[in-house]
Amino acid sequence: MLQRTTSAIFPIFIILKAFASGCATLTGIEAVSNGVKAFKAPEAKNAGITLTWMAVTLAVLTIGIAYYSHHYAILPNENETVLSQLVRTVFSKGIIYYTIQFATAVILILAANTSFADFPRLSSIMANDRYLPRQLSNRGDKLVFSNGILILGVLSALLLILFGGDTYSLIPLYAVGVFTAFTLSQIGMVRHWVREKGKGWIKSAVINGVGGLVTGVVLIIVAVEKFTQGAWMVLVAIPMLVYLAREVKKHYQSVAEQLSVEGCIVDETSYQHHSVIVPISGMQQAVIGAIKYGKALSDDVTAVYVYIDPVETRRMKEKWDTLCLGVKLEILHSPYRSVTEPLMDYIESIREKYPDGVITVVLPEFVPTKWWHHLLHNRRHSSSRASCSSKKGLSQRACHSI
């Protein structure tokens, strides 16, 4: 009885596996849906026409290759692809054979470029909706989303290194990710039609529902079959990415609420006092420029130096007295060698002294001409900049860099 049941179920698994493998040939057409905005107007109509032609072409090629491979009894070979065997069998090794091989190579190159064309565009859309960092929505000098391209390039290189360039191991990652997107997008469209209830919404909801069911079945089959071959990474990564995207959204919403002017009562009274604080780490031209800028803003300018090393402090004090900048120097002691905390405490003391005043923190710094020069400097002004931020959220202080 058990043997009969197993023999009846086994062909079903074979058919499901073949169905899932066949559906994997559909991956790539999602590039059209991701790039609808790149089409000429009317965008949706032109994208639909392109998607239809792609589906028809793909169906004809897939069915044709499958039929003739069966007709000529061609089997998968580790040293030669099925397409190469089929073309060689039909046309022999001649100009047609090498032409098709060259065309196949070109198509694969274009296919590899698809992700670099669509991921940056998709990430820019998500960034505009505040589910990804806003930098991903910025275009570079070449009018492309450079940040998205760079991130995808780094991640692609890491995957190639991690899997040793073995495409057989990378396919499960790609297939699971694609069919997860297919399934979620179809379910999302069903929810859209049910919620909006526009013209012909029942028909559209049924079509998207059937599509979501089919792609969901394929997703389950591929995930189960390829789970130990790397598919588990995608199943773990996707929930993490969704969580991070939601956290990014929450952050931007929180910032927007803090910056919103709705319900804000504008106080027309002027500040009674303006204090300018210039944190310094030594004597240099950037410090002199910052102090000159501070004196142009207010008559109450104070340079602040955090005492960490007694020798360096004495040298700095001697240079300060020699230059005679006409600005008071405040030396703050830091028993735990922290720069941020003493500076923060000093700013708070000025805030308490002039409750109706405003404080401007001017940070002297220089900008290296080459990116690798940043590695050679301690970037202490970054710590000073951190002290400008409030523990409760956004700062109400002004913080300028000179």
Image: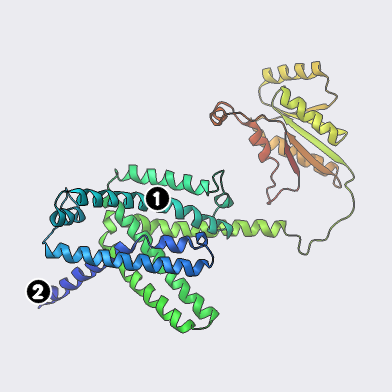
Does label 2 or label 1 sit earlier along the sequence?
A: 2
Q: Which residue is mark 2?
A: 3
In depth, the one of 102 and 138 nearer the eye is: 102
Look at the image and tell me in which quarter the C terminus lies: top right
Type of the residue with mark 1: Asn
Horizontal side of 106 relative to 295 (left or right) equals left
Q: In the image, residue 28 lies at what x, y percent?
A: 37, 60
Which of the 4 image quadrants contains residue 49? bottom left
Q: Residue at x 18, y 66 (%)?
A: 67
Look at the image and tell me in which quarter the N terminus lies: bottom left
Which of the 4 image quadrants contains residue 341? top right
Q: Which mark is residue 233?
A: none
> What whole-number distance in Å separates the C-alpha atoms at marks 2 and 1?
49 Å
Crowd class of label 1 (few under 14; some 14 to 19; many from 20; radius 10 Å) = few
Type of the residue with mark 2: Gln
Which of the 4 image quadrants contains residue 238? bottom left
Q: In the image, residue 249 lies at what x, y percent?
A: 57, 59
Horizontal side of 138 relative to 345 (left or right) equals left
| Element under disc 2 | helix
In depth, the one of 26 and 372 nearer the eye is: 26
Q: Residue at x 20, y 64 (%)?
A: 66
Q: Residue at x 78, y 35 (%)?
A: 277
Q: In the image, residue 45 lies at what x, y percent?
A: 48, 70
Q: Which residue is mark 1?
A: 113
Location of residue 296 with respect to 13 vertically, above or below? above
Location of residue 51 with respect to 312 vertically, above or below? below
Q: In the image, residue 385 lies at what x, y percent?
A: 68, 38
Badge count? 2
Location of residue 7 with respect to 81 vertically, above or below? below
Horizontal side of 174 relative to 69 (left or right) equals right
